[in-house]
Amino acid sequence: MTAYHAAWAWLGGDDLVAHVTIVEEGGAIIEVTTEGPTPHDAVRLEGVVLPGLVNAHSHAFHRALRHRTHGDGGDFWRWRETMLRVAGRLDPDNLAELATAVFAGMALTGITTVAEFHYVHHDVDGDLYRDPNAMGHALVDAAHQAGIRIVLVDTCYLRGGFDAPLEGVPRRFGDGDAERWAERVDLLRRFYREDPMVRIGTAAHSVRTVPPEALQTVVGYAASNGMPFHIHLSEQTAENEAALAATGRSPTQLLHEAGGLGPGTAVVHATHLEPADVARLGHAGVNVVACPTTEADLGDGLGPFIELATAGATLAVGTDQQVSMDLFAEARGIEHHDRLRLRRRGVHSPAALAAAATVGGARAVGTMQRGIAVGAPCDLAVVDPGAPTLAGWSPSDGIAGIVFGGSAYAVTDVVVAGRRIVEAGAHHRFDDVVARIDRAVRAVLA
Amino acid sequence: MTAYHAAWAWLGGDDLVAHVTIVEEGGAIIEVTTEGPTPHDAVRLEGVVLPGLVNAHSHAFHRALRHRTHGDGGDFWRWRETMLRVAGRLDPDNLAELATAVFAGMALTGITTVAEFHYVHHDVDGDLYRDPNAMGHALVDAAHQAGIRIVLVDTCYLRGGFDAPLEGVPRRFGDGDAERWAERVDLLRRFYREDPMVRIGTAAHSVRTVPPEALQTVVGYAASNGMPFHIHLSEQTAENEAALAATGRSPTQLLHEAGGLGPGTAVVHATHLEPADVARLGHAGVNVVACPTTEADLGDGLGPFIELATAGATLAVGTDQQVSMDLFAEARGIEHHDRLRLRRRGVHSPAALAAAATVGGARAVGTMQRGIAVGAPCDLAVVDPGAPTLAGWSPSDGIAGIVFGGSAYAVTDVVVAGRRIVEAGAHHRFDDVVARIDRAVRAVLA
């Protein structure tokens, strides 16, 4: 049992609350008090305490692409060629090294849960590793090492496009059919059933790469096992056009017909939607994972985030391709993209944006994180109000300053399952996180 | 005479050059060598050396607004009400305190020249201070204290709108007519004539707030004295609509008719332009100051930056309302905004974006900065390649990493006029820059 005393804490809403005592036992919060004496042995968190941040969409290995896709014109094909080159070089060892470093880096930024959208399953010829989940285990081991929770979103990826087989590096992504995908995932699900730091999730890469019947199988498997289901949806107009040409339907319609819309579903990006798609997604109560820095970097466009939220969807955020590693930037990116699109300020409340990076993300990835509340996992992130970007702001001014001025650089302490894994900006296990990322990236590129 | 040895330097183009010796005398660069021995007494700059960054559009006092305009709906009017409240509380003393802290903060981020777009000229009743330039001198003194160069862009601001007088706080902005504005500016111009760290520039706040004849007077005064001329242009569609309704012309047309288009002109924002405006601005070879973080925060929209550059304009960047203080973010913001608008990657070359933050800005503000070259002022900013955002990248990979992964946090050393004003992340005069900003903001808001 540990008691933490937060100088300030965000308990929801636009305000911050002073002097909050958070008591944990067995990794869960058993008491939250805002009055009365602080236990004399309480661990003092001298900053603004937030629920641990949830990174609802990550491809850890994309970290190796950062800054390497802008040369030679830097178009989408340059990006894709680099991505496939890196994907072609991964193996369980170098992936574990890279992901350990990347996840430790995430911990330093306040992230306590990562949803890893994992599709590099097989060897370079597309054949099974001896352990068919060698790559998935590498990712889970990495999260264990880094001290954060992982939702391994194991991704079904069966074809190169509506009318194209998997060829070249993408053969690594494919299980042949959805049944074999499910069998492999079932091994993971059973193996990690008792591990409170791991959850196995499901995904279809996209409606482009998973045919309708297989999509139905994935969705059915997720539903019958109570697992979250993720999918890239309408990130670029080309996907919409291809779906329409091949099937006469929008990606959202295809997903709907496969039974894939519901509160356990997270659609990633959801950039280019017709009003009917927005209404359908909102009515189903899906989660929408916005990744604004990626959507800017890849030139995807500005998604209809406020329309989705108003229609009933829950917003979450992800670092996606790791072009940045800062969920504060992703959360305010939702607001900035909507402001740029709608040409007005004040679209989302600051509290709604803070929720996207915390409890909204938790809903999207199917974990128990419910904020700083009794019964929730004791996952916390502490922001230093003395950070340069916050000079002149006070916690008594409310959560807006954290949302618009917080940053990865302002996080000092991180608690996962009641244990402090980052203290005063230092990771409890690795004192060389940046050097580790550097080495791991070079090892993959070598 | 000081010799600096740069581990790496950006001399233009997409590549970085190793082992560059930069020799300065009297504040100017007199030699740049990439071969031969390094002088044994050279000061070693262990990072990537860039020309000093130029902040081509700043309102220092807006720093006090940061994080205070998002509550209560956070719409544009909330922003404007807060801005005017702050503007109403400024006096020469608290402005000097605030600007000193803000400019010292800029120095820490690699900025060596700030163009301060200055319009709070008079006392709270709109009357002259005993020294009619008390507020302008406060800003120049602040830059001196902070050790950076200032281009004081003294701004003419005569009415509240096309058909509205100045009322309330904005009376502080007005000189009554353009002749009196010019007389006041002339005092500044003559006073600072011999100061190599100061340049006096001119501005009209906008075509909305300066009538055509007065605009002509301002433009003529700037031209006859070889001074830069700045103006906010078509930041929001409302300005275009108001201009069209009142005059039948676009803001760009009005500026053209006043003789205000030329290579000495910098138009700020230029967000909403018709193709004819773009062609006219490009043909005239104007400078365009993009302020992407402000344009996102205020919901202005996505400007046609690549079209302007292609038509012949030179791009620069500014921190504007100080919602962020990071010219690396502003420079890549040009690319991100164009990607989001055009839905494709690789719009500007990394070198063009680096130029916008350095030599492009210098052209826009009329200083001599021409990059790391003989005859240019010895203004330098050093980026640490070991920064977290750059892990996995090497200087030999080229400037793209600096543009897309550089940040205010990665700047270690700054040289202005040959003297080091920031060393290992510390300001040479102030060891408490963040606390100073904090205090100064609170003093203004108190």
Image (spheres, coloured by chain):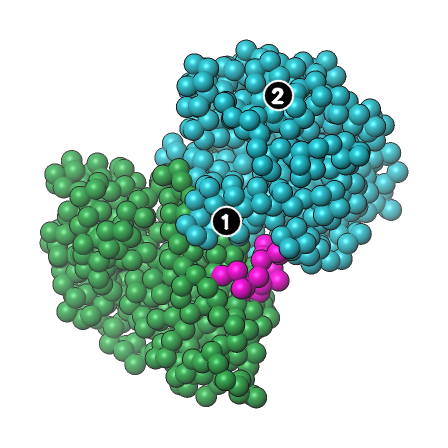
Chain colours: A cyan, B green
Q: Residue A61, percent across and down?
A: 64, 43
The residue sitting at 46% across, 88% down in the picture is B1
Quarter of the image with the N terminus of chain A in it: top right
Structural crowding at the residue carrying mark 2, measured as other residues with C-alpha within 10 Å and reported as few (<14), some (14–19) or many (≥20): many
Q: Is residue B363 above or below residue B292?
A: below
For marks 2 and 1, give the CA distance.
Answer: 31 Å
Q: Which residue is mark 2?
A: A265
Q: Which mark is residue A69?
A: 1
Regarding residue A250, the answer to whether it shows in the image is yes
Q: Of A365 and B267, which appears nearest the observer?
A: A365
Chain letter for the residue marked with disc 1 in the picture: A
Dot 2 amino acid type: Thr
Q: Is residue A104 left or right of residue B305?
A: right
Q: Is residue A206 left or right of residue B251?
A: right
Corner quadrant of residue A50: top right
Chain letter for the residue marked with disc 2 in the picture: A
Q: Is residue B60 above or below residue B251?
A: below
Q: Of A61 and B352, which appears nearest the observer?
A: A61
Q: Earlier in the sequence, mark 2 or mark 1?
A: 1
Q: Of B123 and A256, which appears nearest the observer?
A: A256
Q: Which residues are magenta?
A: B381-398
Q: Is residue B202 above or below residue B309?
A: below
The residue sitting at 87% across, 34% down in the picture is A26
The residue sitting at 70% across, 26% down in the picture is A201
Q: Is residue B384 magenta?
A: yes
The residue sitting at 57% across, 41% down in the picture is A84
Q: Residue A266, percent across and down?
A: 60, 24
Classify mark 2: helix, strand or loop: strand
